[in-house]
Amino acid sequence: MHNVPTRKGLFALSPIAVLLLVYVVGSIVAGSFYSIPIAVAFIIAAVYAVVISRGKSLQERIDDFSHGAANSRIMYMIWIFVLAGAFASVAKATGAVDATVALTLNLVPVKFLPAGIFVAACFVSMSVGTSVGTIVALAPIVTALAAQMGCDVAWLVAIVVGGAFFGDNLSFISDTTIAATQTQGCSMRSKFRTNFRLVVPAAIVTLLVYAFSGSGDGEIDVAAVTLHDVIKCLPYLIVIVAALFGINVLAVLAIGISIAAIIGLAYGSLAWVDVFTRMGEGVTSMSELIVVTMLAGGLLELVRINGGLDFLIRIVTARVRSRRGAEAAICTLTALANICTANNTIAILTVGDISRDISHEFKIPARRSASLMD
């Protein structure tokens, strides 16, 4: 690691400061963190980074940015985003989400309704790869169940939120998992195993609390599960199992898309043209994330070339003397980026290179640093 002078290091890091300033201040002024597109903030910061770089021609600076935006790691990540979006969209169109919800709710006895909702949220979010999508799918259902059972609506919805983040943390098609594993250079299977050991004990304790919390006095009306529902869940189950066996994630997603399409065609929920339409919608849904990923790659490459990353790592690790301290630094950097951007994936992309360098210096396994970030 180079010993970058403080003034030069701060100047090299200023594009990241511009990024956060534009997004955070703009969002505060607008009154919402979703009013300012994060891609616009990255574009402004990227242009600023190109302008302030010294010692090279404009074309050379643009080439440096482009090299960072389109390196093999970034492009591989984009391939996964594209296929994950297509898979999620096709599987959803076949009715797989509704079938998964019905299946998990039916597997748990009525008297353990809160525990059943938690299990459903965990499994659905792990299958669909999005905590927000899980909450959208389950919240209306648990609201109706709360009225039937005489339970507090806020309590059941909170259970859904907790389970949604649990499953999303373990999902193989979650954008946060993709970003964490690719920036740290580890396989999804190894990261899954590390996360599994971290989150399962907490999930078991939570499940036991819900199991003995009672479920109200009413009766609930949950749709009966049929063989068709089980078959519709197969794309999710196959993706999870195949990924656990270490099959390349691109191959896993391609298999998942194919199986989901076959099931949709077989049950008439999709026409052949609908398969392509849904795939296109899924890819389009990832478009902003793809653009931001490339912009982040280019921006951080310029920051690295100018010495900003070396300087930041030196500052962050100045008082760190152990691996535990380095792990805490990785967690802190990710949390701060998350607070500033209000987006898990963008936060991971922003500090991914920094965390990887810290993990290398303190001999933290890549799967561990990816798990900590996620």
Image: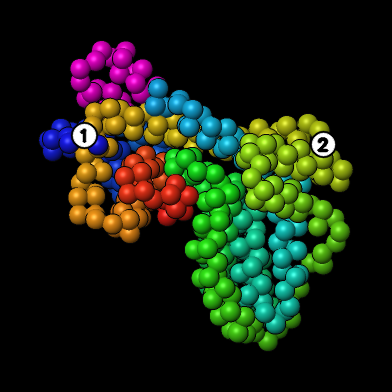
Q: Secondary structure at mark 1?
A: loop
**Which secondary structure, mark 2?**
loop
- Tell me if residue 274 can be seen: yes
Badge count: 2
Label 1 belongs to which residue? Answer: 2
Q: Position of residue 310 (x, y in %)?
A: 25, 37
Find out whether residue 85 is within the magenta segment.
Answer: no
Q: Amino acid at mark 1?
A: His
Q: Position of residue 293 (x, y in %)?
A: 45, 34
- Judge from the rendering whether residue 5 lies leftward or rightward of residue 161; answer left or right: left
Q: Residue at x 61, y 57 (%)?
A: 125
Q: Which residue is mark 2?
A: 271
In the rendered view, would you say 29 is above or below 325?
A: above
Q: Quadrant of the N terminus?
A: top left
The numbered mark at residue 90 is none
Left or right of 39, for residue 124: right
| 209 w.r.t. 364: above or below | below
Instruction: Give the overall secondary structure of the magenta segment.
Output: helix
Q: Position of residue 187 (x, y in %)?
A: 54, 44
Q: In the rendered structure, does residue 56 fall within the stretch colored magenta?
A: yes
Seen from the viewer's position, the closer of residues 222 and 186 is: 186
Closer to us: 174 or 291: 174
- The reply to whether residue 136 is visible in this rendering is no
Residue range of the region highlighted in magenta in the rendering: 46-66
Q: Which residue does the image show at 28% across and 14% down from the upper left?
A: 58
Residue at mark 2 to residue at mark 1: CA–CA distance: 58 Å
